[in-house]
Image (cartoon, grey):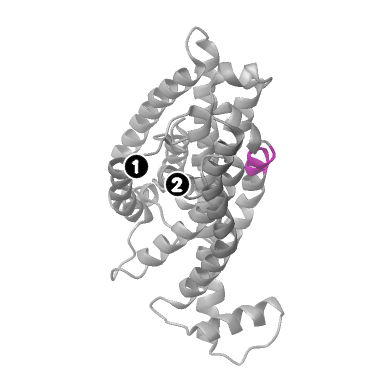
Amino acid sequence: MSEAARAAEAAPARRRSLSLAVLGPAALLLLVLVSLGIGRYPVPPADVVAVLVAKLLNQTSTLDPAAQTVVWSVRLPRVFGALVVGAGLAAAGATYQGLFRNPLVSPDILGVSAGASLGAVLGIVLALPVAAIQGLAFAGGLAAVGAVYAVGLAVRRHDPVLTLVLAGVAVGALLGAGISLLKVLADPYNQLPAITFWLLGSLASVTTGDIAAILPALGLGLAPLVLLRWRVNLMSLGDEEARALGLETRRLRPVLVAGATLVTAAAVSVTGVIGWIGLIVPHVARLLVGPDFRRLLPASMLLGAGYLTAVDLLARTVAAIEVPLGILTALVGAPFFLWLLAAGKRGWA
């Protein structure tokens, strides 16, 4: 294919990228304002803006104190959490799919979600404080991926990508058995409902302090993904092609996997397991901006932040009780993914 033909083929994706870069942040800001105003205690958009401006400028507001509390102390932390967690999970999903050259890969492919779940469930069974439960979840996610990579290093005779995937499946199954055992041993009246609710994912109890605590880990995990984003394009070609182009895949893959894992573990530690975001959102971003990871990563983060914010808004308004996020992401994500499989005519990369 000539350079002119390649440029003509990539032009629509570049135009869509530009449109998304211009319209995406505006749409996301509008969604945030809507999310801050809608709920059991509705607040008009003008009042939402007034509360935010007054708090940010440290001014005294004449608005209803209840409205100020609802917007600033109740809704803003969970909306901010939805933005951060959604962007992180989508970025991790896009990275994993590029590294493993597989459209069915999601952030929990290496057992990070199962490890975080086991850590959190153990903390709940031991009746530890919330901060300790989050810490165990974070450590469990990292430990699970460490175990998967240890197996991958021990088995050098096979394809490294396939070995990691199979090791992730095996370690995930083992950790799942541990979770089931702890659920059997847990108090069925107090601990078991808390375990079930955590495993389904929620932003209901997320505080500003929780988000602030995971921001360093999220930033540290996202840094290599952003700085090495052009190399992910080469990694998606396969190890042999990437090495032929001068890329040290054996050194680069652990760095990128560690970054994506750190992001996922940090996100899951405060919200519980929220599935489908890391699987679906990168597909949508790829359809909009193409497979170039330099555009795909920011597009995935923008769409992931908006998607989880919208799902969280739906979770707290669609029924009399709050619906866990994991249920809604599956209800929305699974049919959409099936539609993508049925209607998609383009390759995933």
Q: Are marks 2 and 1 in contact (CB under 8 Å)?
A: yes
Between residue 16 and residue 142, name the one nearer to us.
Answer: 16
Between residue 157 and residue 18, name the one nearer to us.
Answer: 18
Instruction: Name which residue type carries label 1.
Output: Gly
Between residue 1 and residue 86, name the one nearer to us.
Answer: 1
Residue located beneath label 1 in the image: 344
Q: Where is residue 266 shown, x and y percent of the image?
A: 56, 45
Q: Say what secondary structure mark 2 lies in.
A: helix
Which labelled disc corresponds to residue 287? 2
Q: Residue furthest bottom?
A: 62
Residue 39 lies in quadrant: bottom left
Q: Where is residue 77 shown, x and y percent of the image?
A: 54, 65
Residue 328 lies in quadrant: bottom left
Q: Residue at x 49, y 69 (%)?
A: 31
Q: Residue at x 65, y 80 (%)?
A: 53
Q: Main secondary structure of the magenta part?
A: helix
Residue 212 lies in quadrant: bottom right
Asked if the stretch drawn in magenta spans residue 210, the answer is: no
Does 80 appear above or below 92?
below
Does 21 appear above or below 146?
below
Instruction: Name which residue type carries label 2.
Output: Leu
State the extent of the magenta-drawn residues as a range: 220-227
Q: Say what secondary structure mark 1 lies in.
A: loop
Q: CA distance from mark 2 to mark 1?
A: 9 Å
Q: Residues within 10 Å of mark 2 (few under 14, many from 20)?
A: some
Q: Taking the image as drawn, is residue 129 in sight?
A: no
Q: Where is residue 54 shown, x and y percent of the image?
A: 66, 82
